[in-house]
Image (cartoon, rainbow, N blue to C red):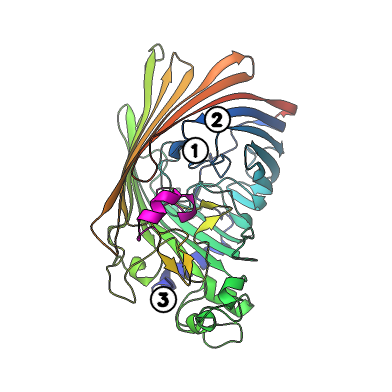
Amino acid sequence: MVKRQQSLFRAIHLVCIQLVGIPSLAQFQNRPTYDTTMTAGIRYRAELSGVVSTNGRSPFWMRSNQFGTVPWQFPAGIGTVGVTGLWGNPRQAHKPYLKAGIEVVGNLNSASRLVLPEAYVAVRLGHGELYIGRQKEIHGLVDTLLTSGSIAWSGNAVPITQIRLGTRDFAPLKFTKGLIAVNAFFSHGWFSDTDSMHNVMLHAKAVFVRVGKPTWKVRFYGGINHFAQWGGYSKALADGPVSKFLSANGYLPSSLKAYKSVVWPIGQPGSDDQFSAIDTINQIGNHLGSIDAGLDIQLKNASLFLYSQHIFEDNSGLTFKNFPDGLFGVRWKAGVSNSGAVVQLKQLTAEFITTRNRSGTKLPYGRDDYFFHGQYLDGWTHQGAIIGTPIFTRTADLPSALLKKSAWLSRSFAYRLLPVNNNDVQSVHVGAYAVLFQRVSAVLLATGSRYYEFDYSARTYDQLSMSLELTNLVLSGSVNMGLKLAYDTGAIFTGNLGGMLTIRKTGFLTQKPVNR
């Protein structure tokens, strides 16, 4: 359903655009403050994995939040080769340095394919970065290790190719003497073509603020992510009785005027040969994002991080008419632990997702579909996977027998099944991370979800998914092994047990110690 994104964007986007002038721009994502290695040179990583399951499909926690690299069909073999180069010294804040990387993943099964989750070149200076290509990213305030997935951009899909200017972390503003730090970015990207959509582009930006110095026991976080699909062509939009309402002969606006309206979605864009009827009365493109808040508390021997992500797709979400829709989480992280203990509990995370409100049922602002849009027929997906939380699932991924039984799951728009339609859901997720025998890392995840037939009846579908992953099972030197088990049971993905065995080798092709 296409919604009107109204003028409340004004103040938010004014802040985002003004921040483009600050030297330290970029994304809040799953990256360290500085490079994890202080060694310049070229590093490599090679992996071989074998995966099997009891019903021939990938369990939820085997495939989710893996940047689109794990196939749906099992058994399968997965081969990964990654190379990262660092040239320069990241410790010298006033000198630029270069980083580049590429990762290729091959899936060998009944539907073999190659995946390119990373391929980029980045120039960095202090906290700032300009990069071209694809990088693995998670956007929003969230615990990236144990999360069920950030609500709008989770790392579930293959990354989108972009040109981005921004910060890599929180950059302190000097005139505040470190009291306030900013993390922001502005980027342009290109979606991969599908059978339904061609030449679709991405507009993305975000701004986050941290209040509190790094040494303080309490720090506050807040910010907003804004993403938009725009431009492109679809033959499906050129045909049918509603084609003139949805597109200009299959084409969606891609002019400079349209881009300005995507970046600054205020009011109606006005008439244009490219604009269809729905473009002139609503907003250009498919808009989505989250308004986030967080609180970091340092305890005596641990820390607590509380966070929330309020999802929006139009004015009703921006004005919190769909409250409490979104994600709420808390992370406990251990401080100094007993290094001699057989089991060291390092981290616990709990999250709750609800999208039961959806701004109510009264149009034009109700029935928010979040990851579906009337013009962008693949929804908020990239290369066959949802970009946001994997708790929402694609219709194409659901068992065919279930689709035949459920009018709700089989909903259609413009004579097509909705690409993402089970977005009326509540979910509870817990995760734990521990170190065993002072060496082996163990991660346990468990997620229980209930999906509701919002438009039809009180019928619900319950789902439980769990996984246990062990890594750093050392074989010899730089070679180690990992083992992962995952299990699904419920009304959508029925009983399924899967296992993955991985052998990994890492090292340097060339290296040069960096002087501090």
**The residue stretch that appears in magenta:** 391-409
Viewport quadrant of the C terminus:
top right
- Check disc 3 and report its element: helix, strand or loop: loop
Residue drawn 52% across the image and 63% down it: 19
Q: Is residue 373 visible?
A: yes
Residue 312, x across and y down, in percent: 38, 63
The residue that label 3 is drawn on is 4
How busy is the neighbourhood of tag 3: few (under 14 within 10 Å), some, or many (20 plus)? many
The residue that label 2 is drawn on is 51
The residue that label 1 is drawn on is 58
Snapshot quadrant of residue 243: bottom right
Q: Would residue 304 be found to the left or right of residue 339 on screen?
A: left
- Check disc 2 and report its element: helix, strand or loop: strand
* Three-letter amino acid code at the position of disc 2: Val
How busy is the neighbourhood of tag 1: few (under 14 within 10 Å), some, or many (20 plus)? many
Marks 2,1: beta carbons within 8 A: yes
Q: Would residue 347 be found to the left or right of residue 108 on screen?
A: left
The front one of 102 and 76 is 76
How busy is the neighbourhood of tag 2: few (under 14 within 10 Å), some, or many (20 plus)? many
Snapshot quadrant of residue 350: top left
Q: Earlier in the sequence, mark 1 or mark 3?
A: 3
Task: Please count the marks in the image.
Answer: 3
